[in-house]
């Protein structure tokens, strides 16, 4: 996510409370678990995921209390921040 900036984390941080372990943006129906806020209490869970071969973040979120925070239209977030760049042609 080369275009990400602090505005996403500022938006997510408004949702932080003790009821959830993680605050994960959801944009256009897709979760963005690499650009999220995680409580440090998630560390043992993620460590266990690595030990057992669970490497996809979407699968690693299972078992956590996750607040999926909409960052789409109307959120005030620049949607271009979530543009994927996977190949030179995407630039």
Image: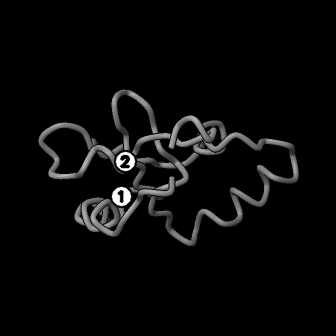
Does 39 appear above or below 61? below
Q: How is the image coloured?
A: one colour
Figure disc tally: 2
Q: Is residue 30 above or below residue 45?
A: above
Mark 1 nearby-residue class (10 Å; few <14, some 14–19, many ≥20): few
| Label at residue 40 | none
- Mark 1 and mark 2: Cα distance apart in space: 9 Å
Find residue 27 and report its horizontal and vertical position in percent.
35, 37
Q: SS at mark 1?
A: loop
Q: Residue at x 52, y 37 (%)?
A: 90
Residue located at (45% from left, 63% from top) = 37
Residue identified by numbered label 2: 67
Mark nearest the camera among 1 and 2 is 2
Please name the residue that numbered disc 1 is placed on: 19
Q: Position of residue 35 (x, y in %)?
A: 48, 56
Residue name at image x 34 percent, y 29 percent: 28
Query: Which residue is more in the foreground, 88 or 60?
Result: 88
Residue 64: percent from left, percent from top: 54, 48
Element assignment for label 2: strand
Question: Does 87 appear above or below 43?
Answer: above
* Drawn side of residue 80 relative to residue 60, left or right: left
Q: Residue at x 16, y 47 (%)?
A: 75
Q: Is residue 84 left or right of residue 68?
A: right
Residue 29 in picture, x, y percent from top left: 37, 27
- Which is nearer the N-term, disc 1 or disc 2? 1
* Circle 1/circle 2 CB separation < 8 Å: yes
């Amino acid at each position: 996510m080369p275009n990400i900036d602090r505005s996403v984390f500022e938006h997510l941080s408004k949702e932080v409370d003790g009821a959830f372990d993680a605050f994960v943006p959801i944009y256009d129906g897709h979760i963005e678990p690499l650009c999220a806020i995680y409580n440090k209490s998630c560390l043992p869970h993620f460590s266990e995921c690595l030990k057992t071969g669970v490497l996809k973040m979407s699968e690693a979120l299972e078992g956590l209390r996750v607040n999926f925070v909409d960052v789409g239209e109307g959120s005030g977030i620049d949607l271009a921040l979530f543009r994927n760049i996977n190949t030179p042609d995407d630039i």
